[in-house]
Image (cartoon, grey):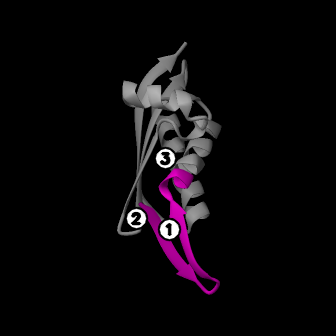
Amino acid sequence: MAVKTSNKYGRISTNDEAIALVAGYSALDCYGVHELVSRKLTDSIAELFNKQPYGSGVKVTTVDNKIYIDIYAVLKYGVNVNAVTESLKNTVSYNVENFTGMIVKSVNVNIIGIKV
């Protein structure tokens, strides 16, 4: 699925994989995030052959030109989980909205673990 918008220059279509890459880069830049991980073992095996680590751990769904993002992250030990998740939501939402020009309806952060 793709998100579509138009402006005075023409129509713009953004693929879900591109949105996932932007969200992945943004998530890894947040303080306290160690890595993004897949939610299922089959996804992890498939990503071994896919050479894009920044799209892993990010699921993008688009419905009626609204973007829903799920992030699966491992945090660093000793960080405030609530502060990191709020920072992650705000950063990813801002960067994806800036990139696509569309509304990010929700960013769900799923903490998979803590890295010591």
* Dot 1: element: loop
Rendering quarter of residue 64: bottom left
Where in the figure is residue 48, as x and y percent of width and height? 53, 27
Residue at numbered disc 2? 66
Where in the figure is residue 27, as x and y percent of width and height? 57, 41
Where in the figure is residue 101, as x and y percent of width and height? 55, 69
Marks 1/3: CA distance? 16 Å
Q: Nearer the viewer, residue 107 or 44?
A: 44
Question: The magenta stretch spans which residues?
Answer: 1-19
Residue at numbered disc 3? 89
* Dot 3: element: helix
1 or 3: mark nearer the eye: 1
Q: Quick one: label 3 or label 2, which is nearer the N terminus?
A: 2
Q: Nearer the viewer, residue 36 or 46?
A: 46
CB-based contact (under 8 Å), mark 3 and mark 2: no
Please tell me whether residue 65 is drawn above or below residue 30 in the rendered image: below
Q: Quick one: label 1 or label 3, which is nearer the N terminus?
A: 3
Instruction: Give the class, few, some or many, for how many residues have Cα within 10 Å of label 2's Cα (few <14, many ≥20).
Output: some
Residue at numbered disc 1? 102
Q: Nearer the viewer, residue 83 or 62?
A: 62
- Dominant SS type (magenta): strand
Identify the residue at horizontal 51%, vertical 36% (top origin). Answer: 56
* Dot 2: element: strand
Q: Is residue 27 visible to the viewer in this orientation of the structure? A: no
Instruction: Give the class, few, some or many, for how many residues have Cα within 10 Å of label 1's Cα (few <14, many ≥20).
Output: some
3 or 2: mark nearer the eye: 2
Image quadrant where one finds the N terminus: bottom left
Please tell me whether residue 66 is drawn above or below residue 17 in the rendered image: below
